[in-house]
């Protein structure tokens, strides 16, 4: 990672009045949670997340889809937040203590930001920790133990099923949540895009919204992404290393 760019970004952050961070699967990779566009191995090697994360897949084969989500839910419960999650929580606390604004919009469904101490988290793609009834929409938090029936029957309506309360391809994002993320992106001075490939819309459009409204845009990622060509600064490396270094470079709060 280029130390000059790191210090430039730290300076921008230290002067910012409003900061937005959007996170993707890469932020949780160092907690042992697989990213979406990683190659699959082991038990799930024949399953393509991009094909399973759809309402059509659930309709066609609800047992396989819910079994996959329960397997992932248990993986998320067993995982711990990593230094990247913790650094974002510390950044929020630092800005809040100074009366400044910070909004964290995540595409992740694993709740690791909340467990790291982030207080205001906009879950753009829902949460795997909550499941909802296909008939009534009522939600529940399943026990931390493995589910025993696939697909799980809904306790709320005869003949209905439970599905994870996540946003699949072709489904709408929770309207209020996305509207809040858009408002914050329009109003921020610095926008951080962390550990996301920036290919899934409308979340991937937020950084463009921020740039169009004058924000300084920064990408933190191990690799180049769809947004790399036009961001103001790119910090290459694992977010669990880059984010703590960035915070340290901001100096005392
Ligand atoms: C590291 C690292 C480390 C690794 N440190 N970095 C406009 C244009 C084109 C298409 C569309 C459009 N608008 C809508 C669409 C359709 C579609 C879409 O975007 N398709 C694209 C794929 C082309 N969007 C939708 O369908 C959305 N709905 C919608 O728009 O509704 C309106 C509508 C309805 C009907 C018709 C048309 C429009 C809904 C999108 C929902 C996405 N859902 C998922 C699954 C969630 C549930 C679950 O968890 O299973 O969300 S898909 C999946 O992708 C998941 C993720 O949140 C999302 C983004 O992935 P993410 O987080 O970026 O992960 P990866 O794996 O892609 O990238 C990881 C990155 O980390 C990489 O860059 C690595 O390098 C990096 N990395 N380790 C830092 N240690």
Image: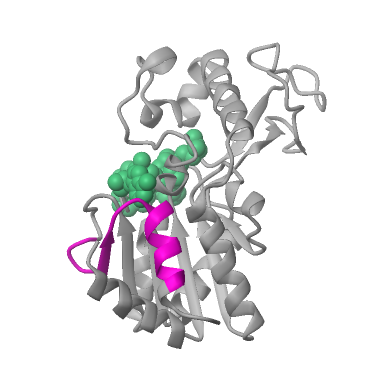
The answer to whether residue 39 is above or below residue 228 is above
Q: Is residue 253 left or right of residue 52?
A: right
Q: Which residues are magenta?
A: 228-248
Q: What is the quadrant of the C terminus in the image?
A: bottom right
Name the residue: 34% across, 23% down. 40
Residue 143: where, in percent of width, then height? 77, 27
82 sits to left or right of 146:
left
245 in magenta = yes
The answer to whether any part of residue 202 appears in the image is no
Residue 50: image x %, image y %? Answer: 37, 31
Between 16 and 250, the residue placed more toward the observer is 250
Decide: is 28 above or below 97.
above
Identify which residue, 70 or 139, lies in the foreground.
Answer: 70
Quarter of the figure with residue 160: top right
Q: Horizontal placement of 121 versus 206: left or right? A: right
- Residue ID at (32%, 73%): 217
Where ligand 1 lies, by image quadrant? top left
Judge whether 15 appears above or below 4 on screen: below
Closer to the camera, 38 or 158?
Answer: 38
**What colour scheme was applied to this rendering of the protein?**
one colour
- Residue extending furthest toward the left: 229
Q: Is residue 17 part of the magenta span, yes or no?
A: no
Q: Quadrant of the N terminus?
A: bottom left
Q: Position of residue 171 (x, y in %)?
A: 49, 43
Q: Does residue 83 appear anywhere in the picture? A: yes
Q: Residue at x 66, y 49 (%)?
A: 115
Q: Residue 244 location, x and y as percent? A: 45, 62
The number of numbered discs placed on residues in the rendered structure image is 0
Instruction: Name which residue lies at 35% across and 18% down.
Output: 41
Q: Nearer the viewer, residue 214 or 56?
A: 214
């Amino acid at each position: 990672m280029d130390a000059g760019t790191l210090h430039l970004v730290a300076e921008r952050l230290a002067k910012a009045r409003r900061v937005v961070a959007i996170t993707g699967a890469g932020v949780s990779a160092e907690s042992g949670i697989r990213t979406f566009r990683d190659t699959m191995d082991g038990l799930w090697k024949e399953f393509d997340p991009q094909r399973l994360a759809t309402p059509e897949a659930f309709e066609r084969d609800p047992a396989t889809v819910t079994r996959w989500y329960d397997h992932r839910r248990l993986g998320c419960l067993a995982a711990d937040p990593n230094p990247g999650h913790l650094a974002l929580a510390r950044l929020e606390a630092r800005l809040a203590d100074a009366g400044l604004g910070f909004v964290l919009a995540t595409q992740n469904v694993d709740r690791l930001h909340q467990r790291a101490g982030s207080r205001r988290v906009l879950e753009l793609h829902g949460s795997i920790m909550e499941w909802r009834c296909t008939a009534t929409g009522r939600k529940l938090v399943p026990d931390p133990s493995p589910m025993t029936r696939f697909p799980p029957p809904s306790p709320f309506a005869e003949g209905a099923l439970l599905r994870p309360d996540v946003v699949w391809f072709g489904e709408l994002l929770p309207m209020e949540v996305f509207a809040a993320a858009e408002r914050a992106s329009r109003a921020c001075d610095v926008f951080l895009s962390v550990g996301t490939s920036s290919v899934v819309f409308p979340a991937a459009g937020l950084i463009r919204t921020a740039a169009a409204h004058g924000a300084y845009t920064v990408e933190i990622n191990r690799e180049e992404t769809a947004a790399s060509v036009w961001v103001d600064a790119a910090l290459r490396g694992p977010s669990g290393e880059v984010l703590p270094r960035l915070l340290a470079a901001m100096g005392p709060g």
